[in-house]
Image (spheres, helix red, strand yellow):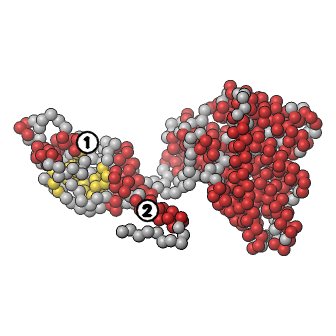
Amino acid sequence: MVTNPSSPRADGLPVSPGFEFERDAFVTAEHRVPDDYLPVDRRTVFICGLALLIAAAGGLAARVLVMLIGLITNLAFFHRVSTRFSSPSDAHVGAWVLVIPVFGALIVGVMARYGSAAIRGHGIPEVMEKVLRGESRIPARVMFLKPLSAAVAIGTGGPFGAEGPIIATGGAIGSMMGQYVHVSADERKTLLAAGAAAGMAATFGSPVSAVLLAVELLLFEYRPRSLIPVALAAAVAAAVRVAFEGTDPVFAVPPFAQPGGAALLIYAALGAVIGAFAVGVSRFTYLIEDAFELLPVHWMWWPAVGAVAVGICGYVEPRVLGIGYSNIEGILGGTLVGRALVVLVVLKLVAWAVYLGSGTSGGTMAPLFTIGGGAGALAGAGIASVAPSLGVDARVAALVGMAATFAGASHALLTSIVLAFETTRQPVGLLPLLAGCTAAYLAALLLSRYSIMTEKLARRGAPIRTEYQADHLVHIIARDAASRTVVSLGADEALAEVREWLDSGTSASHQGFPVLDAEGLLVGVVTRRDLLAGPDLGFDGLRRVRDVVRRAPAVVYGDSTLRDAADLMVTQGIGRLPVVERAEPRRVVGILSRSDLLAAHASRLAAGQRAQRSDASPDRPPPTAS
């Protein structure tokens, strides 16, 4: 009655009794084996086509946002109608600078309360939350209200960058496309990331770092079918920017000198210090946000309260107001130094943190670049004056400080390095950037589990990990994890005898059984419940095991992965899979259960525990098994 073949196992199949395992017929069966892995397919080409449309729209949206910021800035500070980008620091409006940001903040507060509260903040955490918890669905109104609110906030003097809002806007464009076109949630996430990358590429002319930002902060994966559409979108959006702005880098600075070995060590050490500084900056902004939570007024009025600090800081140092790309250029070019730089860094930090903590709309990248670049320049200048023989260049230190601050605050290491290069086109800076940003990333991770983006999500009860590693189950093939001893039933065995055998308790550890025909070929799979169900045996107890096979079996090939097997178990709602070989898809060589999938993680967990014990007791060898 019970047979015990042994061998490996494989991928998933469907069959019904008597069904011939012809591949052509087989693929039309109700239950299928796991699909063969394909890195891309025709569906990917379709998503790429949608991504190109999104990229064009995202590039144009970025252009419109910049023009809108220019229009509001000119109206608020220069009393003229023009979309030409202007700096509020050139307006010389005197004490009116105390009022203008408050007026803009009141508008943003009304838009947030009666339009959409999703426009509050700097944009990227909100997009991340939609990717992780909302199937990448962003409401259509956000696509319009986010850039409009950001333009009002920045145009009236808000010390923000345009990149966060345009990333959110581009993501909203991609999400809306994914909601109107029939795509899966996974494909919608790709379209959202493509729109976000397009927005960033169109803002900074940085397509490569835009792709890296999408990977590090939005996609939470690195797969060809998602990477290719995002990369194409970033390239197209960058081309749209070239059509309007030309090919010059965002920050045009004189060439840097090649650093020596000693200088590289200094830049790495500076990066570590800046990384710790970036953690402090992040905590400071959330401290301010917590303080606003204590105010006895509705959150709609908080931006107006924060705008008071912006006005005061702007009155003391007008360069604090607005995006301040010219400030970053001055820091990197070495024209903004000394006391003026100290005042700018301190007041920019205060104005930005207070206004952002109040819940208004604006980006973090440009302010962090200003604050970090200024801190790096000041440190570099100090080191150069004390030890000129080290060859430290204050401008390179500013570049490292700029990128390291963003790396430490955002935990987006590769994005920070490449973005600093793309926005300056200084190849000499790549090695200092690699050393400094990596040191900053290490220091930041040691000091803080969350970044300035993910901290907000953690506070909302949705902590995330921004680590990307291949699924452990992908590396294990089915035949290596399957049980070689298979307890099976004959298709023509009497059901009465099988029930007696089950009642004897011999098979207590088994819940499912492959059913084999006279030639030992798979007919189906039955569970203990299938065998025991039914009021009687009927026909004087002549019913056979094959009579209770209810559906075509799902099987897994021996060279399939455990991830394929797990996915098939979920989709078919089953707890075990016969393992077969591709050459003989009805010859059972093993069986795989859910407990086998869990047991496959034992080696990974054991390795991690050994590493933890070693880290906790470096001078003591790990205990040996008894």
Which amino acid type corresponds to the residue marked 1 in the rendered image?
A: Arg
Q: Nearer the viewer, residue 414 or 235?
A: 414
Task: Identify the residue at image location x=19%, y=42%.
Answer: 531
| Residue 373 can be seen, yes or no | yes
Q: Which residue is mark 2?
A: 606
Which amino acid type corresponds to the residue marked 2 in the rendered image?
A: Ala
Q: Which mark is residue 551?
A: 1
Element under disc 1: loop
Question: Which picture quadrant has residue 376?
Answer: bottom right
In the picture provided, is 284 more to the left or to the right than 602?
right
* x and y, in percent, of residue 134 in the image: 54, 38
In the picture provided, is 34 more to the left or to the right than 44?
left
**Going by the picture, which residue comes out furthest to the top?**
114
Task: Identify the residue at image location x=37%, y=43%.
Answer: 571
Element under disc 2: helix
| Residue 247 can be seen, yes or no | no
Task: Identify the residue at image location x=79%, y=63%.
Answer: 396
Q: Which mark is residue 231?
A: none
**Mark 1 surroundings within 10 Å by alpha-carbon count, few (fewer than 14), some (14 through 19), many (20 or more):** some
Task: Identify the residue at image location x=11%, y=41%.
Answer: 543
* x and y, in percent, of residue 307 in the image: 80, 35
Whether 606 is drawn above or below 95: the answer is: below
